Image: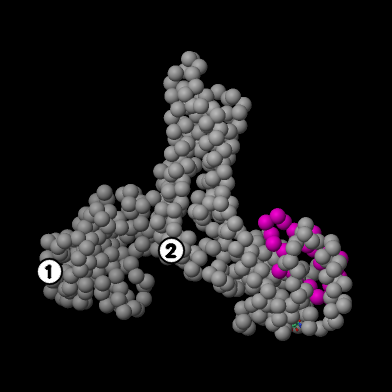
């Protein structure tokens, strides 16, 4: 247990009806008592609330409610005191000064949660989920964070680790017997386990695409020549005049990002300069940005019309930018302006050349009249729904976990290869230990100060 007692404002810094200051550590109750006039806090039961005043010597600072939580059934497993005061930043500052004077020290960012982790109350992935919960902006991200806090991923991983651990012990036993050429670990059973592991790890890894979409949103790039109607479409989707709509070709020079929430998922729309070859320097920056945006986007809405584009151009574009992990949606805009006949011939050509190898959706819309906008939204929602088609019931949302799972999978593949090639037991044991370590990184069983510093520094002070 930590010797020093830490304190910090737990609520947002600003005026509010109430504010909460939290103390955690061996002397939390003693320090609170020194700063308090009311019942003797040191004689109170755990999980009780008490009325009184915060005092500085003879001076009364505020009328407060003080909650006492005694170790070990607390968030940090240490004694915790929470002071609810009238939510003025000035009062918060005065109370903190008094607590510091009476022996507490200011908590560092994430230090309460770090103590909860260090004292074994939660594992690392749960600590991370607390930061995710605080940062959650919609239903989807709240739910996945809460599932992780409840230990979803920890349970799944620990089952996998246990299986692997059993085999590693058997293999190490073989090593102990050295020269005698005995096999404790049944290689057929081991192959089966490895196969199973590979399967489960792959499913978890695959779930990251969905998890990441829920947590961070889906990046959507709206691309097309200048004047194709990109800003107009973006506005129709946002239903607000936020992007600058202009009739002069190439004036949407900077990337504008806007977010809409559909069925609880955030879609990040990026409106960019047209992909027209250009000599204008400022516009060139815009074009480069557009290419960068396509590189990071998951969905690309390619806008065209039959006045400014030819089918050959659209086909060339799609063939150039098509990627396995990019959904390209062809959006034929300005359908209010011409006869169906011309549009049909245009789109038939696209269909013949591009479907289903390069893309599989073609929509006809009028961004200006706002027709077909719902269909665009439906495609986006379906995109996320389809990502959900995966076997794991636990969803990975964290890049660090994803990396650790990838490394675990690599080691499992190596173990599999080692087994089938009849490699020396010592090397086999080495590969197995590697896989175990990578799996242990997720829960924090194997970790280092740098990783921890990185995780907890992203928390706010008071958490
Ligand atoms: P961007 O350069 O691709 O962002 O294009 P804008 O959104 O600025 O649109 C260029 C021009 O096309 C504007 O005058 C829009 O009003 C017009 N426009 C956009 N969509 C449509 C549409 O569906 N029908 C018609 N008739 N005009 C449109």
Q: Which residues are magenta?
A: 301-328
Residue 133 circle label: 2
In the depicted view, which residue is nearer to us: 320 or 380?
Answer: 380
Decide if residue 372 is on the left or right side of residue 107.
right
Q: Where in the figure is residue 38, as x and y percent of width and height?
A: 13, 71
Return the mark for residue 462: none
Magenta region includes residue 326: yes
In which quarter of the view is residue 381 placed? bottom right
> Residue 434, how many percent across, how many down?
50, 36
Seen in the image, is 328 located left or right of residue 152? Answer: right
Mark 1, Cα crowd under 10 Å, few <14 / some 14-19 / many 20+, is few
Q: Is residue 309 above or below residue 206?
A: below
Pick whichever of labels 2 and 1 is earlier in the sequence: 1
- Ligand 1's quadrant is bottom right
Q: Looking at the image, which residue is at 41% across and 43% down?
A: 445
The residues bearing labels 2 and 1 have C-alpha atoms spaced at a distance of 35 Å
- Report the residue at 36% width, 76% height from top: 14
Q: What SS does tag 2 mark? A: helix
Q: Secondary structure at mark 1?
A: loop
Label 2 residue near ligand 1, CB within 8 Å: no
Residue for point 16% across, 75% down: 59
Residue 110 % position (x, y): 38, 58
Quarter-wise, where is residue 55 in the image? bottom left
Residue 89 within the segment the image draws in magenta = no
In the image: residue 110, left or right of residue 358:
left
Residue 391 place in picture, x, y as percent: 56, 51
Q: Which residue is under mark 1?
A: 39
Of labels 2 and 1, the one closer to you: 2
């Amino acid at each position: 247990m930590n010797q020093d007692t830490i304190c910090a404002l737990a609520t947002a810094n600003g005026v509010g009806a109430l504010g909460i200051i939290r103390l955690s550590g061996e002397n939390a109750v003693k320090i609170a008592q020194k700063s308090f006039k009311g019942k003797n806090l040191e004689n109170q039961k755990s999980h009780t609330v008490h009325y009184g005043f915060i005092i500085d010597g003879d001076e009364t600072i505020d009328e407060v409610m003080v909650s006492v939580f005694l170790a070990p059934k607390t968030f940090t497993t240490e004694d915790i005191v929470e002071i609810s005061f009238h939510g003025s930043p000035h009062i918060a500052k005065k109370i903190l000064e008094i607590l510091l004077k009476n022996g507490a020290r200011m908590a560092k960012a994430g230090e309460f949660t770090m103590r909860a982790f260090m004292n074994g109350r939660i594992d690392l992935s749960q600590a991370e989920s607390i930061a995710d919960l605080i940062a959650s902006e919609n239903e989807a991200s709240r739910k996945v964070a809460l599932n992780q806090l409840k230990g979803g991923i920890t349970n799944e991983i620990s089952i996998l680790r246990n299986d692997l651990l059993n085999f590693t012990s058997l293999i190490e036993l073989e090593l102990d017997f050295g020269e005698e050429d005995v096999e404790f670990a049944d290689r057929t059973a081991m192959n089966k386990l490895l196969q199973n592991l590979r399967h489960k790890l792959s499913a978890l890894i695959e779930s990251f695409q969905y998890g990441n979409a829920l947590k961070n949103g889906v990046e959507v790039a709206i691309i097309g020549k200048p004047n194709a109607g990109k800003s107009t479409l973006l506005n129709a989707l946002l239903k607000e005049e936020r992007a600058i709509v202009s009739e002069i070709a190439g004036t949407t020079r900077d990337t504008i990002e806007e977010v809409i929430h559909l069925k609880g998922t955030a879609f990040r729309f990026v409106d960019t300069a047209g992909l027209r070859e250009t000599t204008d320097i400022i516009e060139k920056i815009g074009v480069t940005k557009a290419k960068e945006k396509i590189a990071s986007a998951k969905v690309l809405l390619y806008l065209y019309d039959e006045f400014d584009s030819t089918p050959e151009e659209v086909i060339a574009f799609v063939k150039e930018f098509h990627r396995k992990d990019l959904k390209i949606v062809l959006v034929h805009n300005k359908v209010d302006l011409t006869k169906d006949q011309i549009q049909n011939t245009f789109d038939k050509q696209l269909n013949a050349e591009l479907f289903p190898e390069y893309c599989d959706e073609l929509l006809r819309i009028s961004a200006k009249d706002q027709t077909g906008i719902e269909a665009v939204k439906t495609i986006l929602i379906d995109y996320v729904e389809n990502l959900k088609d995966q076997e794991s019931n636990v969803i990975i949302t964290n890049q660090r976990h994803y990396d650790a799972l990838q490394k675990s999978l690599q080691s499992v593949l190596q173990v599999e290869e080692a087994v089938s090639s009849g490699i020396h037991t010592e090397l086999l044991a080495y590969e197995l230990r590697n896989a175990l370590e990578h799996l242990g990184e997720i829960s924090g069983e194997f970790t280092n100060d740098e990783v921890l510093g990185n995780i907890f520094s992203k928390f706010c002070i008071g958490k």
